[in-house]
Amino acid sequence: MKSFLKICLNQPTCFSPRGRQFVSNSNVSSRVVSVSDVIGRQMDTGELRHDVAQKESAHRLSKLQIALEMYDNSPLVDYFQELEKLEVEERQTTKATSHKREDDAESTTVKTEVEENNINSKMPPPPSFKIPRGLYIFGDVGTGKSMLMDTFYAALPQCKKRRRVHFHAFMQDVHERIHDLKQQDLREKGRNFHVDTSEVNNPVVRVAKNLANELSLLCFDEFQVTDVADALILRQLFTVLFQYGTVVVATSNRPPSDLYEGGINRSYFLPFVDILERHCIIHELQSNLDYRMILSQGMDSFFFVRGLQIDSESKIDETFR
C-alpha cells in the first residue's frame, strides 16, 4: 500500500476505469462568455486598445477557463485522505502485532503478506478525471496582466473552491498556519513531537493538504520570491497542492527560471521551479506597451504637501476626479 501511495503522490493525475467520472463541462462552456470574447469586445468598442499580446494571453486563459468550469478537486482530496487513513491503520496494526509475533521468520513472512493483502483489498478506486494544467503569465510591468486575471477570475463563478490573492499575502497566511499547527502540536503532544520528521506530521505538508481541501483554483497576483523562508518551503507546499488537484494561475514580472535569483541557498529552491513548469503552462505576455504610462499622460507627477500656501486638497480632487 505504501508503494502504491508513493506512486500516486508522484503523478500529476490518476486514472482508473473503475473510478468516479468527472462531470463533463462541454454544455456549461457553451453558456459562459470566454475571456477572449470579453477582451475582444472591449477592444472593438474602444474600451481597450487593440493589443495582439493581450489577445494571445486571453486565448490561453479561455482554454483553461473551459477546463475549469465546474472543476472540483474534492474527489481526489477524498481519495488521498482515505489512503492516508489506511496507511495509519496499517502502521498501528503493524506496531500492535509486532510485539506478539514469534521469532519464526517463515510465519512472520506469511502473516505480513496476509496483512498487506487485507490493506490492498480496502483501498478505494482512484477517481477518474484529469487535472487541468495551470497557467503562469509573465511580462513587463503595466502590460495588462492583472486586468486579464480580473477577467479570468470573474468568468469562473461556477468554480466555488477558488481564491485570488497577492502571492506575498498568501505566503504570510501559510506561515501563520504553520505556526498555529506547531503550537497546537506543542500543546497536545509535548516538545518531543517536534523531533518527528515523518511526512504525515510535517507541518508544511499538513498545511498544503488543508489548502488543497479548500481550493480547486488558486490565482496569484505578483508571483515573486524574495524571502528565504518562503523559498525553502515552496517545493514541499506546491508538490502537495498539485498532487491534490489544486490548479494554479499566476501573473509575474519574471519567468520562473528568474525567481529568487541571487537568493540565499537558491539550490534548494530550484526544484520548485521544475515543479511549477511541469504543472503550469509558461506564457510570456510580449507587449511593448506600458498602460500605466499611457494612462498617466498629461498628468502632473508630484507629491502633495499640506501647507498654508498650497491648496493640496483641491489639487488632489482635480487629479483623481
Image (spheres, rainbow, N blue to C red):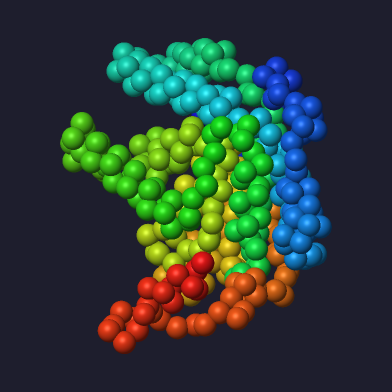
> Can you say whether 222 is above or below 203 in the image?
below
**Foreground pick, 15 / 150:** 150
Residue 61 place in picture, x, y as percent: 71, 49
What residue sits 70% from the left and 65% below the top? 285
Residue 5 place in picture, x, y as percent: 55, 30
Residue that sits furthest to the bottom in the current view: 309
Residue 252 place in picture, x, y as percent: 58, 63
Residue 22 visible in the picture: yes
The picture quadrant where one finds residue 270 is bottom right
What residue sits 61% from the left and 45% below the top? 153
Relative side of 245 to 168, left or right = right
**Foreground pick, 89 / 183:** 183
Residue 130 place in picture, x, y as percent: 70, 34
What residue sits 75% from the left and 43% below the top? 34
> Can you say whether 71 is above or below 248 in the image?
above
Relative side of 293 to 94, left or right = right
**Foreground pick, 150 / 81:** 150
Residue 113 visible in the picture: no
Relative side of 26 to 212, left or right = right
What residue sits 61% from the left and 51% below the top? 150
